[in-house]
Amino acid sequence: MAYSVLEPAVPFTLHVGDDECLQLNQLLQLSRVMPKTWENQHQGRKYDITHEWLRAQESYINNSPNYRMLVNHPKGDVTVHFAALFSKDLQAIPIVLLHGWPGSFLEFLPVLELVRKKYTTDTLPYHFIVPSLPGYTLSLSLPEDQEWVADDTARVIDQTIKNLGFDKYIVQGGDVGSLIATMMGTNHDSVVEVHLNLLPTLDATSPEDPILNDTEKGAVQSAIKRSSVTAGAAMLQIKKPSTVAAVVSSNPIALLAWIGEKMLDWTEEDPDLDHILTNVSLYWFTNCFAHCIHIY
């Protein structure tokens, strides 16, 4: 289906004010850092935020087309940010890519870069839409007088895509995005296909169960190991989200420690340091942490 720019979608350019950058550095300088112990020393993992570095990351983000759109919702209008590549091909298929926690739309920018190198807008076979989930980073405008749940997010994302002129589309999701994608596929007829790279299951069976083949046994062992790593943080955010939010949102080092740890522990390969710092900086400058963890 052809795409033409509709009135609700407004081009968006990210810019963090110099005063916000200065305040962040002041907080970093004034923060008391925990003493070194044998357990907390990790060679090669350092952090630094400079004005020049921040502007370079802004330029990287703005190199992809970004937009914002005001989306109507019964609980209150929500401003949704998304990066996107739109095709001029009349047969192009819309694909919506949903991030999770503690991630952001940044996860998909390398994909958009690869696509732009391979295709022109005339030959691109898909429309790629990468929203910031409501409550996350650049889509931070949730109503404060009512509880916001995952189904609300699914409804807003679906309406965003419809506002762009697409009545049928594919949705892909990982982590929290897999929950939203599942709800969209279940409750919204406009979703024709769903792809998930996180499949929540009931408690895993024993890897020694004779009904399993070797591949399945390995998968069960991996699931048990992964659960032991992730369960603690998830349970804390489920049981005490406001307490965690109050502590983590109050200090940039706390935010870096909480999110950076997950980005290192929950991935097969350590993400690039610039990616970690850019992601955490987006969380800090938008002050979104308290909103996004309540989805747990």
Image: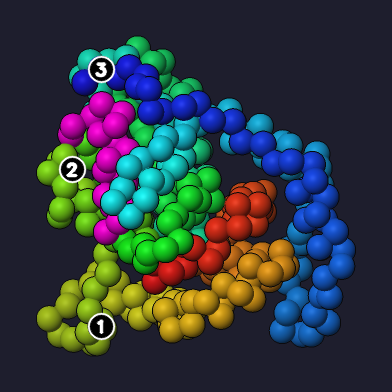
Cβ–Cβ under 8 Å for marks 3 and 2: no
> Where is residue 256 shown, x and y percent of the image?
66, 65
- Nearer mark to the viewer, of 2 and 1: 2
Going by the numbered disc 1, the residue's amino acid type is: Asp
- Within 10 Å of the Cα at label 1, are there few (<14), some (14-19), or many (20+) other Cα atoms? few
To which residue does mark 1 refer? 203
Q: Is residue 167 above or below residue 228?
A: above
Q: Could you say which is closer to the camera, residue 157 or residue 277?
A: 157
Between the C-alphas of marks 2 and 1, the distance is: 29 Å
Going by the numbered disc 3, the residue's amino acid type is: Ala
Image-quadrant location for residue 294: bottom left
- Whether 152 is among the magenta residues is yes
- Within 10 Å of the Cα at label 2, are there few (<14), some (14-19), or many (20+) other Cα atoms? many
- Left or right relative to 18: residue 224: left
Question: Residue 2: which disc?
Answer: 3
Residue at (36% x, 40% y) in the render: 71
Residue at (35% x, 22% y) in the render: 6
Q: Is residue 255 above or below residue 128?
A: below
Residue at (82% x, 70% y) in the render: 31
Question: Residue 92: which disc?
Answer: none
Image-quadrant location for residue 25: bottom right
- Could you tell which of marks 2 and 1 lies nearer the N-terminus? 2
